[in-house]
Amino acid sequence: MSLSRRSVIAGLSSPVLLPLTIERRPQRIVSLNPCLDVILVEVANSSQIAALSHYSRIARQSTIYDLAMRLPQTHGTAEEIIALRPDLVLSSRHGARATRSALERLGIPMALFDVPSSLAESLVQVREVAAAAGFAHRGEALISRIQTAINSTRTDNPRRLKALVYQPNGFAAGHGTLMNEMMELAGFDNVAGRYGIGKWGNVSVEHILANPPEVLLSGSLSPTVRTWSERMMRHPALASLSDQIVQTTLDEKLLYCGGPVLIQTAVALARARRAALRILS
């Protein structure tokens, strides 16, 4: 599947893509979003990738950093993108509207994607990016790998652990998020809701002290960078709960994206759960 020569506006995980022949497969694809980057490099030929987003060159946040350093990048300005002469642009619906408008006026084909809030939506996004790149079968193969990885981390131990996940920017993932579903599949019960968190929000130390979870999982930037979540997890007041709360970290680069990143996220969550069970048993 490929694109018509007109702009394409996507609905929720449903880009309006028109089937074209293999010969008309996009030859110069630009991705403006790091979570679309990680899918694109898995399903497209490297020769098709005209540029990835510059975010994929941030080592602490990117699972494809080494590969991204070998591919062109863009900061997402209309001038930059136009100079790349793309025949397909992949973008988040939350990206810069002015840039999208400029590309639309020039008739540059574009597919917009929302942020997946569930595993099902993430897998659909994989399928659609692969189809847009002209390699639908690679999307199906990647989906199979993701599902296999998640299934392989399941455990027979029925005990579920009450947990809270913090991103380095201080936000906790609540219900209705992809991370929430990954936690549940790994054997955790996400307790963000008990602190009044919807999809995302901050939780104070006072709330945790009053009603502690069994496990606190925090995204860590690097050994030399202290994040909001790390400062909170090392708060002296939490030391008094060291016999009740298991504190552990998840690599920051596993906290933001779905697609192939979920393979590593599933493994990391399963490892964290096994470690917590050993301590809490």
Image (tube, helix red, strand yellow):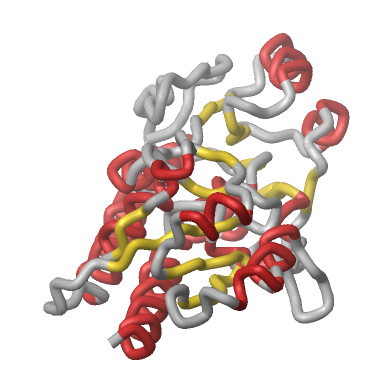
When asked about the image quadrant of residue 275, the answer is: bottom left
On screen, 276 above or below 37? below
Residue beneath the point at 50% across and 31% down? 113
Q: Position of residue 213 (x, y in %)?
A: 42, 62
Location of the C terminus by quadrant is: bottom left
- Residue 102 visible in the shown view: yes
What residue is shown at x 30% (from left), y 67% (from top)?
A: 161
Looking at the rendering, which quadrant does residue 151 occupy? bottom left
Residue 16 image offset from top left, x and y in percent:
41, 20
The residue sitting at 47% across, 36% down in the picture is: 196
In the rendered image of this protein, does residue 181 appear above or below residue 98?
A: below
Rendered view: 89 above or below 65: above
Residue at 34%, 83% in the rendered image: 280
Q: Is residue 275 left or right of residue 115?
A: left
Residue 265 on image: x %, y %: 44, 67
The image shows a total of numbered marks equal to 0
Q: Nearer the viewer, residue 219 or 51?
A: 219
Q: Nearer the viewer, residue 8 or 213?
A: 213
